[in-house]
């Protein structure tokens, strides 16, 4: 069975973006780019909320993205995409499917189909909404060694969900990848 893993970059103080939605604090280097390629190769489908989908589409299709990071850009542009949105009516970064209702059940069905994993990238609000449902199998938080002081908290608004630490990976840059899975008791997520 396929799994859905969520990947979010976070600051040391728990923000996924700065107060003005800025992401200029992300700590990326060659080792991070190698990791990004490896992670994308685990999946054949990308999953986004509307805001992240539009932000990713505005960057990865550009000549600058292809020139700066051809490995990641090629994968991002070719892979199937799913956008969870009630507002998006004209997605233009495809191939793409828009889910506007019964998102958890659609994703649970998709996990039963053959294929590689599904990567939920960024999309902290979508992750917060899906995490308590049990449809997310892994939560991967890449903590950058920077304190923002203020911003948008990661998975803000999520219902209480206990997580089990699966592994820790330290990067030379000071980034630390924390991989968790939701804890299950008696067949339900707690």
Image: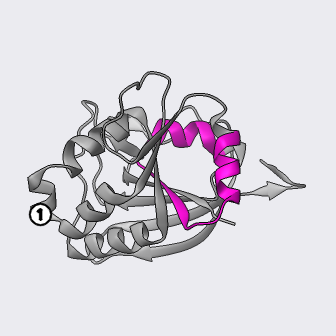
Q: In which quarter of the view is residue 145 placed?
A: bottom left
**Residue at figure coordinates x 27%, y 34% from the top left:** 21
Label 1 residue SS = helix
122 is within the stretch colored magenta: yes
Considering every residue shown, the one lying at the far top of the view is 87
Q: Badge 1: how crowded within 10 Å, few (<14), some, or many (20+)?
A: few
Residue visible at 41% across and 33% down? 50
Specify how the rendered protein is coloured: one colour
Residue 164 x, y percent position in the rendering: 67, 62
Residue located 26% across and 70% down the image: 33
Magenta stretch: residue 123 in it? yes
Write down the residue under mark 1: 68
139 displayed left or right of 113: left
Is 107 left or right of 122, judged from the image as shown? right
Q: Position of residue 135 (x, y in %)?
A: 67, 49
| Numbered range of the magenta stretch | 105-131
Query: Is residue 130 among what the camera can see?
Result: yes
- Where residue 69 sits: x, y (%)? 17, 65
Considering only vertical position in the picture, is 106 above or below 3? above
Residue 89, image quadrant: top left
Q: Nearer the viewer, residue 184 or 176?
A: 184
The residue nearer to you, when weighing 38 against 113, is 113
């Amino acid at each position: 069975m396929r799994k859905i893993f969520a990947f979010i970059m976070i600051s040391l103080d728990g923000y996924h973006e700065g107060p003005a939605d800025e992401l200029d604090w992300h700590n990326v280097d060659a080792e991070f780019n190698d990791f990004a390629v490896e992670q994308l190769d685990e999946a054949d489908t990308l999953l986004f909320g509307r805001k992240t989908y539009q932000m990713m589409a505005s960057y990865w299709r550009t000549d600058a993205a292809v020139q700066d990071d051809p490995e990641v850009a090629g994968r991002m542009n070719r892979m199937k995409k799913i956008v969870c949105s009630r507002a998006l009516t004209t997605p233009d970064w495809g191939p793409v499917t828009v889910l506007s209702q019964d998102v958890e059940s659609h994703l649970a069905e998709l996990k039963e189909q053959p294929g590689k994993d599904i990567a939920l990238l960024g999309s902290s609000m979508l992750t917060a909404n899906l995490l308590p449902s049990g449809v997310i199998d892994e939560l991967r938080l890449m903590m950058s060694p920077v304190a923002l002081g203020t911003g948008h908290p990661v998975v803000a608004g999520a219902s209480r969900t206990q997580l089990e630490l699966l592994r820790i990976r330290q990067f030379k840059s000071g980034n630390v990848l924390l991989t968790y899975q939701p804890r299950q008791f008696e067949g339900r997520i707690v």
